[in-house]
Every structure is written in C-alpha cells, then in structure tokens.
Image (cartoon, rainbow, N blue to C red):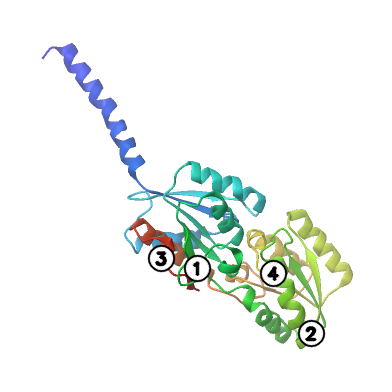
Amino acid sequence: MKRRDFITLLGGAACAWPLAARAQQAAMPVIGVLSATSFDNNADRLRTFRAGLAEHGYVDGQNVAIDYRSADGRLDHLPAMAADLVRQQVRVIAAPGSAAAALAAKAATTTIPIAFGVPEDPVKLGLVASLPRPGGNATGINFFSVEVNAKRLGLLRELVPAAARVAVLVNPANVARAPSTRADLEPAARVLGLQVQFYDASINQEIDTAYATLVRERPDALFVAADVFFSSRRVQLISLAARHALPAVYSAREFVEGGGLMSYGTNIIDMYRQVGVYCGRILKGEKPADRGLRSA
C-alpha cells in the first residue's frame, strides 16, 4: 500500500468514529424532564428520579439521556418548554411535582407519553380519564398536598396556641392550586377559631411586598401554601420569617432543612422516585393508557 493511500485510509477511519458515536447517541432514548421550579436546590429530587429510572435498568448517560427544562417558578414559560421537548422528539416527558408542568406537556402532545406527579386530582385537571384506567398518553402519581391543608393549619394552631390571626401566602398565578387552597383553609380556620388573611405573591418582589404588609398588620403566624414557586424561593421566605420572628408552617421538608420552623406534607422526594419508575416502565414498552395511577 502506498503511503498516501494509507494516510487517506486512516483519515477516513478517524471520520467514521465520531459519526458512529453520534449515531449511537442518537439511538439513545431521551427523557425530557419539565419542571416548574429550579433544579439548583433540588439535587436530592433529581437523584431519586434517576434512582427510580435505574430500578428498570436505565442509567443516565449510559443507556438513556435526560434533557432538563426548568421554568424557575415562571409558569408562563412552561408551554414553550414543553413544545420544544416535543420538537426534540423525546421518548417520554416527565413532569414531577407540578400540575402546571403536566398540563403544559399534555397540551403540547397527544402522542408522546407523559409521566407526572401532581398534588391535585388529575381527573378534574383533565390529565386522565380515570385513576385506574388513565387513557390517553399520560399517567403518574397523585400526591396529597391540598388535602392536608386543614391538618397543616391545625398543627400551626397547636404550635402557636395563642394565635388568632394567620396570614396565608398563596400564588395567584397557580390557577390549579390557589383557589382550592382558599376553599380548604377558610372552613378549617372557622373550626379552629382562627381568622385567615390571604396575601398574593407570584414574583420575588411580591414576596417582599407581602412581608412588608405582614409587618404592618402583625398577624400571629404565617401559612405558606404548597407551591412550586414558593419552593424555588424557600431561602427568601425562610429568611424573611426569621427576620420578623414570624412562626411559619410550610408544605415540604426542604423548608425545615433550610432553617424553617415546621412543615407537614407529602414525601416529595419519593414522589420523584416513583415518577422515575413510571418513565422506566414506559421505556420498557408499557402504555400510559393502561398504567393506573398511584397515590403518594
């Protein structure tokens, strides 16, 4: 073989290797994770999501790729993110922890499977036809959050027995959550002999504004509603409560781990694992329409 031919052959082989690698990568199934909240402070949630996938033999970077999309609390960004995942032709869309993310995914596609975790009734939301037989392209986990609002308020009453007035922080942009929170807490407060006053916040500045009002009006305690926006701003919320010596109850363990006073709610970490399990089953060939929902 002539030296020139040998060099040409080597060059052709070198070009073939990255092409083969790209072809292998393209064949790897991709899961799009659509989140309403930031991933920055949710390493444990993502770790358990990947652990759920691993229960069915899927390891990120080895035989499956994960494309993370976060709205960082800006719920109006979710539809565009969901549409982009559909354009990327991901194999599954995971929407753990947020009805807004699940609804955005559902609106974006009727064919790509969706595995969700939502705190509201998925039938009422229109995500599925029924719990045992979801139908369509979506299935997942219904975890109890709204249902424990009355219990959470009762625990706050026990913690601050002299409390008469409780401020409730809600996110009006979360149209699936805010009305039900109000509907749950008003009758519960009457039973407990409490007065509740609702304060709205859907952006950072409104959290500061709400706290400025709280300082003037001097409620006895604070109830922070379960909401992905508040979860993404938990450092800000915890710091403000501490600064103003305001007893506060939250919906998730991460608030207490960050220095908050008390929380009561669903094990969100395990919900992420279960959504990962659902994604693994879907990749194995199971159909969302046939996979009944579970409660966490």
Coordinates of residue 263 in the picture (x, y in percent): 63, 75
Q: Are marks 4 and 3 in contact (CB under 8 Å)?
A: no
Q: Residue furthest left?
A: 1
Q: Earlier in the sequence, mark 4 or mark 3?
A: 4
Q: Are marks 3 and 2 in contact (CB under 8 Å)?
A: no
Instruction: Give the Cα separation between the discs numbered 1 and 2.
Output: 32 Å
Q: Are marks 4 and 1 in contact (CB under 8 Å)?
A: no
Residue at 28% from the left image edge and 34% from the top image edge: 20
Q: What quarter of the picture does the N terminus occupy?
A: top left
Identified by mark 1, the residue type is Ile
Answer above or below: position of 124 versus 114.
below
How many other residues sit within 10 Å of disc 2, few (<14), some (14-19) or many (≥20)? few
- For mark 2, give the secondary structure: helix
Q: Earlier in the sequence, mark 1 or mark 2?
A: 1
**In front of the other: label 4 or label 3?**
3
Coordinates of residue 280 in the picture (x, y in percent): 37, 60
Q: Which mark is residue 190?
A: 2
How many other residues sit within 10 Å of disc 4, few (<14), some (14-19) or many (≥20)? many
- For mark 1, give the secondary structure: strand
Camera-nearest residue between 210 and 95: 95
User: Which residue position holds label 1?
Assistant: 141
Identified by mark 3, the residue type is Asp
Q: Earlier in the sequence, mark 1 or mark 3?
A: 1
Q: Tell me if residue 223 can be seen.
A: no
User: Which residue position holds label 4?
Assistant: 225
Coordinates of residue 119 in the picture (x, y in percent): 59, 69
Q: Which mark is residue 290?
A: 3
